[in-house]
Amino acid sequence: MSSSWVSDIAPDSPFSLANIPFGIISTPADPAPRAGIAIGSQVLDLKVLSSHPKFSQIFPSLKGHEGIFSEPTLNAFAALGRPVHREVRKVIQDLLSAETSHPEILKDDAEFRGKALTPQRGVKMHLPMSIGDYTDFYAGYHHAYAVGVMFRGPQNALQPNYTHLPVGYHGRASSIVVSGTPIQRPHGQILLDPAAEPKQPVVAPCRRLDFELELGCLLARPNSMGVPIGIAEAEDHIFGYVLLNDWSARDVQSWEYVPLGPFNSKNFASTVSPWVVLADALEPFRTKPIENPTPVQGYLKEGREDTVFDIELEVELETPQGDSTTICTTSSKHLLWSFPQMIAHHSLGGCPLRTGDLLGSGTISGPAAGQRGSLLEMSEGGKKDVLLYGMDARRFLKDGDAVTLRGACGPPGGRVGFGECVGRIRGAVNL
Amino acid sequence: MSSSWVSDIAPDSPFSLANIPFGIISTPADPAPRAGIAIGSQVLDLKVLSSHPKFSQIFPSLKGHEGIFSEPTLNAFAALGRPVHREVRKVIQDLLSAETSHPEILKDDAEFRGKALTPQRGVKMHLPMSIGDYTDFYAGYHHAYAVGVMFRGPQNALQPNYTHLPVGYHGRASSIVVSGTPIQRPHGQILLDPAAEPKQPVVAPCRRLDFELELGCLLARPNSMGVPIGIAEAEDHIFGYVLLNDWSARDVQSWEYVPLGPFNSKNFASTVSPWVVLADALEPFRTKPIENPTPVQGYLKEGREDTVFDIELEVELETPQGDSTTICTTSSKHLLWSFPQMIAHHSLGGCPLRTGDLLGSGTISGPAAGQRGSLLEMSEGGKKDVLLYGMDARRFLKDGDAVTLRGACGPPGGRVGFGECVGRIRGAVNL
């Protein structure tokens, strides 16, 4: 990878020339949401780029789709498919490269460059896609085991199906928000004394508010209803990846979730990072998943071993006083199932997956202390303090706390990452 | 209710002048999907009606929305709110009434009437709304108990939360189809011998394919994220009702559903009836729900006792040979929770409900034999034959079977109903 002529790309920037993530931006000068890509601390406005007289010439795969980057979501672009994403990303990498084959477009045209490049700090980010359906899987083995012990004891921690199929459930699409959106503490039915009989719930603000560190996968090509996506083609249905915080009300969850699964404990909010890292950008960071002791069915068998990504993930908790502590560092490789396996399973019965659908990995935890992707695990079910900077501690989130997920991989100067996925808790409303 | 001048409204037609249900239609002459209402065996094309010079005068509440019935879904109309739906329905009732105050528009204008009224048999019906999220509740007490016994035994049939909150889960929006769409038997992971240890699933076409008789509720006004809908306002968020067949793969379900709930067993297809019966049309048919032995929380307390509807429901099974048997007759009153309670609970934590969202009641079964809303219950978990006309029998659905749900209420000549919600099973694809 050559270097870029764009100034001030810090060596640790997740938005190096090796990345080229897509997002939906707006600016005070042009408040209409539209597509952009992140490069260092700048944003390249693709609507402005589309207005260049040579646009159609340098992006031949976008012929007939010249307005695609002026749309308020990335859905239409995603629907064009992997080969188009690949070509467009390569052309943008070339345009931003020090040895660009088209210096006349951006590098050497100060006026056009000034219009097309904007500092990220002045840009408002929007939800990158219109998400039709959101499915949350449960592929983080260490999380599933630890939480299973808490909810059902060590004998039943993992159900017999867990290693045979990627367990998942349908989430709520309407409450997915972009990084930075405040997260309101939900009310819910909770048991103040879960052991007391008969069970007597009260309605109160959640007392066990938690985050979940997940990788999210956004889909490109749809399948027709009734037509399963074979595992060999699943990769071609992936547009890209985001960080996902699947906020969880643990006290609501433990009371409501039998027998049909989590509901209000999850549907009040889920936060995604604003920049979609294209599937191709993560290709160099493939690695092996957690080994599955169970032989899997043919429709879940992949033709390769390196089916997940080794992305360094971290979670930072900032208190209302402004003190920050990194409470988790782990990797996205700690999954029992890959996204192609999730896609093949999801569509096995013919369920139509659509462009823009979001699949969550499930909470990602490593095997060691310091690698837990939720406070539920860190606090061992709310029994132990999680120590923070400045003599502070948490078992679950307090009002005013902010949780920031970060994820990136690659060497200095060639980092590929998501930037931040942030949400700050605000107090419950009065009912 | 006066009578209508429209000819051939049979006394048992569910589309009497007392109904006026809204749907999305297209015709060979105008293939663009648009709004219509059903009256007897005819359809009134609301796009054509919108073209009448007096349209704005007789529909004052649609001022500024003159194109609303030319849209391909009812969402924009639904979003206008209950008072507008009420006024529009009343005006249409007047236009179609024998004593209409505007005979010049339809009754006495043969040419315009000929353009606006079309026989239903020549009309293609489409999904009435764009459904953002689909939530399926579990409020059919008799069903929940019977199925709970089968899945978990009589001691754990109903979980302790069941009478405290309307249990529900997020369904799949992408696979909701309109009545008449063929339903393909899904493949899935199933246990040929569920009792054998260790569990060894195979991938095969579902062997225990079932229907579920449900009432569906489509939402009108949205709430803002973070703002719960109080029970007193919940009724105003309802647009109308449809019949819902939540097709289920029982063998897939019993293996996959722990611990996060049903997934592939439900997401291959759900069928809705094409005509949306407005909430106001069902007002005269209110009755009491199943009595809840548990005192409910304040946010679930309603100011009235008649919180559900007594709609006569039936299920007909037609074999590939063309023999039909009515296998269930029951009522939509057999619910422990009302739709306003479901709405108040769903939004308690701030979950945003949107215009067009679909809420399912859960399978509706009466207490007696002959009132079961699924084959799983009728066949007692697949152990007993359900006898059909012509010496035939079923435990679950065979390829070529068609299931028709019907629902209506009211006296002859003043019937309010949904028409049919039909799906015919076609064989699994080759994987």
Image: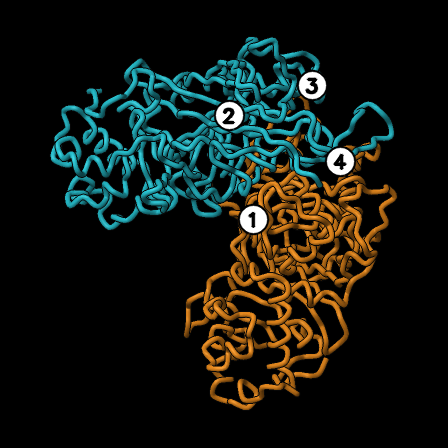
Chain colours: A cyan, B orange
Identify the residue under disc 1: B269
- Residue A78, located in which quarter of the rendered image? top left
| Label 2: chain letter | A
x%, y% of residue B170? 61, 41
Element carrying mark 2? strand
Is residue B63 positioned above or below B9 on the image? above
Expressed as whole percent of the image width and height from the top left, the position of residue A186 reads 65, 34
Residue B415: x and y, percent?
71, 72
Secondary element at tag 3: helix
**So how many labels did they put on this image?**
4
Residue type for callout 3: Met
The numbered mark at residue B413 is none
Marks 1, 3 in one chain: no
Q: Report which residue position mark 2 lands on.
A: A214
Question: Which chain's residue wears label 1?
Answer: B
Res. A203 mark: 4
Which is in the foreground here, disc 3 or disc 4?
Answer: 4
* Secondary structure beneath label 1: loop
Between B283 and B318, the residue placed more toward the observer is: B283
Which element is circle 4 on? Answer: strand
The chain letter for the residue carrying disc 3 is A
Q: Contact (CB < 8 A) between labels 2 and 4? A: no
Q: Disc 2 marks which amino acid?
A: Glu
